Image: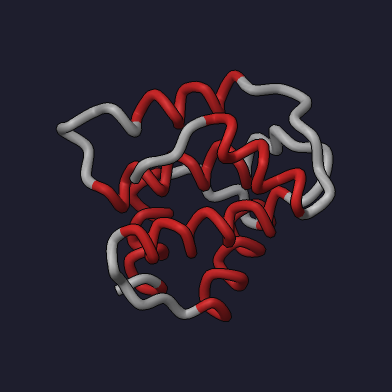
Amino acid sequence: MKIVKEDMISINKEVGGNLTRDGSLEFAISMQKNTRVGEYKKLAYLWRAILVDHPFTDGNKRSAVLIAIEFANQNNKRYDEEKLVKIAIKIPKENITNISKIERKLKNAIK
């Protein structure tokens, strides 16, 4: 996925948030350069950073969904927006931090 920190901040600003802390976000973005990590796993790292660590003041879930849609568009994949929203709500609610679990959920919504 081709996304940089500035893209994520811009997406979040569109939904009314601001960056407050970026440690885990920086790590998730650094994973995007790892050629040994698959594309869905890279997206899962971004989702965990956004949904579990809440780097933005507001709009974390909406930002995660918009980033997943951008991922789908970049990779010519179809996505189920309703599933993405449900997953974006479930991950922080149940404090799902396991990257493999997040990856499986994303694969179920983006094909």
Location of residue 91 with respect to 52 vertically, above or below: below
Tell me the quarter of the image containing the C terminus: bottom left
- At horizontal 45% and vertical 31% (from top left) the residue drawn is 28
Location of residue 111 with respect to 74 vertically, above or below: below
Q: Is residue 5 left or right of residue 15?
A: left
Residue 45, by quadrant, is top left
* Colour mapping: secondary structure
Q: Is residue 43 left or right of residue 22?
A: left
Q: Nearer the viewer, residue 104 or 10?
A: 10
**Residue 14: % across, % down:** 75, 51
Q: Nearer the viewer, residue 32 or 100?
A: 32
Tell me the quarter of the image containing the N terminus: top left
Q: Is residue 57 left or right of residue 62?
A: right
Location of residue 59 with respect to 46 vertically, above or below: below
**Residue 88: % across, % down:** 60, 61
Residue 9, by quadrant, is top right
Report the residue that reaches farthest toward the left: 36
Marks counted in the figure total 0
- At horizontal 40% and vertical 48% (from top left) the residue drawn is 43
**Residue 10: % across, % down:** 67, 41
Q: Nearer the viewer, residue 90 or 66?
A: 66
**Residue 109: % across, % down:** 41, 73
- At horizontal 53% and vertical 50% (from top left) the residue drawn is 96
Residue 5, by quadrant, is top right
